[in-house]
Image (spheres, helix red, strand yellow):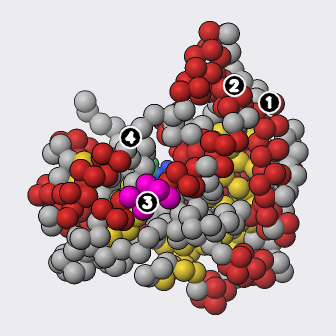
Amino acid sequence: MPDYSGTLGSKLPRVGTTIFTVMSRMAAEHNAINLSQGFPDFGCPPELLKLVTKAMKDGHNQYAPMPGLPRLRQQLAAKTEALYGTAYDPETEITVTSGATQAIYTAIAATIREGDEVIIFEPAYDCYEPAIELNGGKTVYAQLNAPDFHIDWEAVKKLINHHTRMIIVNTPHNPTGAVLSDDDMQQLISLTKKNDIIILADEVYEHMVFDGQPHQSMARYPELASRSFIVSSFGKTFHTTGWKLGYCIAPRQLMAEFRKVHQFLVFSCNTPMQVAVAEFLDHKDHYLELSAFYQQKRDTFNNLLRGSRFKLTPSAGTYFQLLDYSGITDAKDTDYAVELLKTHGVASIPVSVFYHKPVYNNVLRFCFAKKDETLEAAAEKLCKV
Ligand code: PMP
Ligand code: GLN
């Protein structure tokens, strides 16, 4: 097909195909066990499937209300208040989105103007920076410090100036599995209290925090909640990444701006899934037991790798585990991930791609949201390396 693109150029010249797509495709081509892209290889609760089917048969197949089904928003308000102590008004402060990705894009598009600076922490999940750039913002990079990937708050303080409009935090953190502590939250409070910085909190792994630690939601801290967009994803919580359903909560004024964009980006999200999830949220045990469920998966994977040449510190949250291969080779992680996939049959994600200028910590990310037999088969291969 002849291509008229002559003078258009690209609005995102540095962006290619995401690493998740690249590695999943390569895993399929080489018949490797895919621990790269983050998604479960097991199904969602069977009752949730029944509820979706029922919703479709009952005729819930037309547009949902723009901000989301009222019953679902009420459920989310109740859940947020019960878990984190802040009451959000479902009418004006909660919006259902097409996954967390759309919520993140929408929050950025609704608030970031030409020249605004947005601080992100590297390694950073891949959808933040393109959204900032497309909206005329400038990405400012703070570094998480290996090996535990903690935040150096003094360094963050130095990045703040009168152009700083937003800080994006992600806890539990993808790709490292690090979680923020109460001390981190106090630092964030003191950093933002004298200015009008907005926080975009990516909390999609809120129900996957291990070893008895609490999830530090912005919603636990009134000073932070009052300036935060908090984003979560049913894809993670209900093992349904393909449904692309999530939500955003924020105080009324921020949410009003969010909805102005949301209504023209997607208008509303798919109805039968919303009906089903609203019903299913009555099963509190599902998400309250998710941390224990994934902690067991983490421990299974960690124990299976005990005899291997990889070094690991158990992940504190998410369904990702970093493996340090510095005892095996000093190859770049981008090269080693390909070698591991092609030679040993296990697909992972190189962490250096989550930096604007690659930092090589000799770690790869593995997803342990998999059946035990998948983890066993992968570990067997990894132990032979
Ligand atoms: N943020 C993080 C940190 C993620 O890992 C993901 C993963 N998929 C998303 C956002 C996007 O979530 P969703 O699939 O609901 O768009
Ligand atoms: N969030 C998933 C991960 O980190 C991938 C989502 C995607 O493919 N965009 O692996």
Specify few, some or many for label 2: CA neighbours under 10 Å numbering under 14, 14-19, or 20 or more: many
What are the residue bounds of the magenta stretch?
295-300
Label 1: how many Cα within 10 Å (few below 14, some 14–19, many 20+): some
Look at the numbered disc 1 and give the secondary structure of its residue: helix
Write down the residue under mark 1.
Answer: 71
* Residue bearing mark 4: 41
Q: Looking at the picture, does residue 249 appear above or below residue 188?
A: above
Dot 2 or dot 4, earlier in sequence: 4
**Which residue in the structure is indicated by mark 2?**
275
Amino acid type at image mark 4: Asp
Q: Circles 1 and 2: CB distance less than 8 Å?
A: yes
Label annotation for residue 298 = 3
- Dot 4 crowding, Cα within 10 Å, few <14, some 14–19, many 20+: some
What amino acid type is highlighted by mark number 3?
Arg
297 in the magenta segment: yes
Q: Position of residue 119 (x, y in %)?
A: 60, 72
